């Protein structure tokens, strides 16, 4: 990708038109807002010998090397597997890379994502290079959770926040990317993605809509007493846990708003009837206790704690069902 997402054009122009670039940038923003795309395009721009119309030309020798994935002056550091830490040997790679002179005689660029996946060793190696910047070397960090970075790292980077598009712009963009999907599907995908278009695209690729349909059917059967929590938990075991957690968190928020009379319909349209019914029955104290429990578990799963998924799902479903029973 040599161009940022359309909603980041303004930010892109004010960044690339500067006379001097900072030694290190931290691109922050919600997951799926287009940070990686922005940073990748910026790396391409920095390495290009003759950017055209404000973006990498894709024609010069440097661009050809980059497009072939073999640019010697571009180092991409990411976890081997999504969600895992950036390993120590990656740190050595980083140190070596920074100490070498540029092989193409121009700039060197390190793209590191997600920056919060660095362990302490990696972070210390990075810190050293931030403290003693070498000329014409640029560090591009990408993070959804900049608060998890060492403050000493954050303070040495120029922080460039990247925003989400307006909802209408997100909807138009997504329907252009997914012409086979209905407007309703696109709007549900965006809602599941918290308004982040690239996250919505990833969800579409995960076939999240049909999984969602199964989950909503499961919830209905559970509340009608047609299926036991343990059975449903087993059925849901293959589904991505972070999706299930996101959905339950969103439904819980919907329930709270409905229960308090803050809204009349749930934001999750496919659960509107179920949530509307539940909202009439739930007690606020019980709902808040459930929300605390749920958020705590979402945090545990996000920190890669070793939890038994089926057991967690079963407990969650028992509690969800119990929301309907006054104590
Ligand atoms: Zn070029």
Image (cartoon, grey):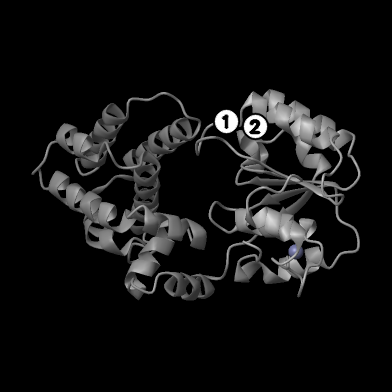
Q: Residue at x 32, y 30 (%)?
A: 309
Q: Quadrant of residue 100?
A: top right
Q: Quadrant of ligand 1?
A: bottom right
Q: Residue at x 80, y 65 (%)?
A: 16
Q: State left or right for residue 246 relative to residue 159.
A: left
Measured as percent of width and height from the top left, residue 245 is found at 38, 42
Q: Residue at x 18, y 38 (%)?
A: 232
Measured as percent of width and height from the top left, residue 202 is found at 44, 55
The answer to which of 118 and 196 lies nearer the viewer is 118
State whether residue 27 is above or below residue 55.
above
**How many numbered marks are there?**
2
Dividing the image into 4 quarters, which one contains the C terminus?
top left
Measured as percent of width and height from the top left, residue 274 is found at 22, 56
The answer to which of 240 and 75 lies nearer the viewer is 75
The answer to which of 181 and 312 lies nearer the viewer is 181
Mark yes or no: residue 327 visible: no
SS state under label 2: loop
Residue indicated by mark 2: 118
State whether residue 47 is above or below residue 306.
below
Mark yes or no: residue 253 visible: yes
Measured as percent of width and height from the top left, residue 287 is found at 34, 42
Dividing the image into 4 quarters, which one contains the N terminus?
bottom right
Mark 2, other Cα within 10 Å: few <14 / some 14–19 / many ≥20 = many
Q: State left or right for residue 90 relative to residue 129.
A: left
Residue indicated by mark 1: 85
**Residue contact at pointers 1 and 2, CB within 8 angstroms:** yes
Q: State left or right for residue 291 relative to residue 57.
A: left
């Amino acid at each position: 990708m040599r161009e940022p997402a359309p909603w980041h054009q303004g930010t892109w122009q004010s960044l690339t038109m500067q006379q001097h670039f900072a030694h290190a940038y931290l691109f922050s923003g919600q997951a799926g807002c287009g940070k990686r795309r922005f940073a990748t395009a910026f790396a391409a721009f920095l390495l290009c010998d003759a950017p055209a119309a404000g973006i990498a030309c894709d024609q010069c020798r440097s661009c050809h090397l980059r497009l072939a994935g073999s640019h010697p002056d571009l180092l991409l550091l990411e976890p081997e597997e999504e969600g895992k830490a950036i390993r120590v040997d990656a740190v050595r790679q980083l140190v070596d890379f920074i100490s070498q002179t540029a092989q193409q005689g121009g700039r060197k660029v390190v793209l590191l994502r997600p920056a919060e996946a660095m362990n302490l060793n990696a972070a210390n190696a990075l810190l050293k290079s931030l403290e003693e910047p070498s000329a014409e070397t640029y560090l591009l960090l990408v993070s959804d959770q900049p608060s998890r970075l060492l403050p000493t790292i954050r303070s040495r980077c120029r922080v460039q926040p990247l925003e989400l598009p307006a909802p209408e712009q997100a909807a138009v963009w997504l329907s252009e990317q997914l012409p086979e999907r209905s407007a309703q599907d696109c709007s549900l995908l965006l809602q599941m993605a918290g308004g982040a278009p690239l996250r919505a695209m990833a969800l579409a690729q995960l076939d999240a809509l049909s999984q969602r349909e199964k989950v909503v059917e499961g919830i209905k059967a559970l509340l009608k007493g047609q299926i036991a929590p343990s059975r449903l938990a087993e059925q849901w075991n293959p589904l991505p846990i972070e999706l299930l957690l996101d959905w339950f968190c969103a439904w819980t928020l919907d329930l709270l708003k409905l229960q308090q009379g803050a809204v009349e319909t749930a934001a999750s349209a496919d659960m509107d009837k179920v949530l509307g019914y539940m909202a009439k029955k739930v007690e606020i104290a019980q709902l808040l206790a459930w929300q605390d429990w749920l958020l705590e578990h979402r945090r545990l799963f996000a920190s890669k704690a070793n939890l038994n998924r089926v057991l967690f799902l079963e407990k969650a479903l028992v509690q969800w069902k119990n929301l309907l029973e006054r104590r």
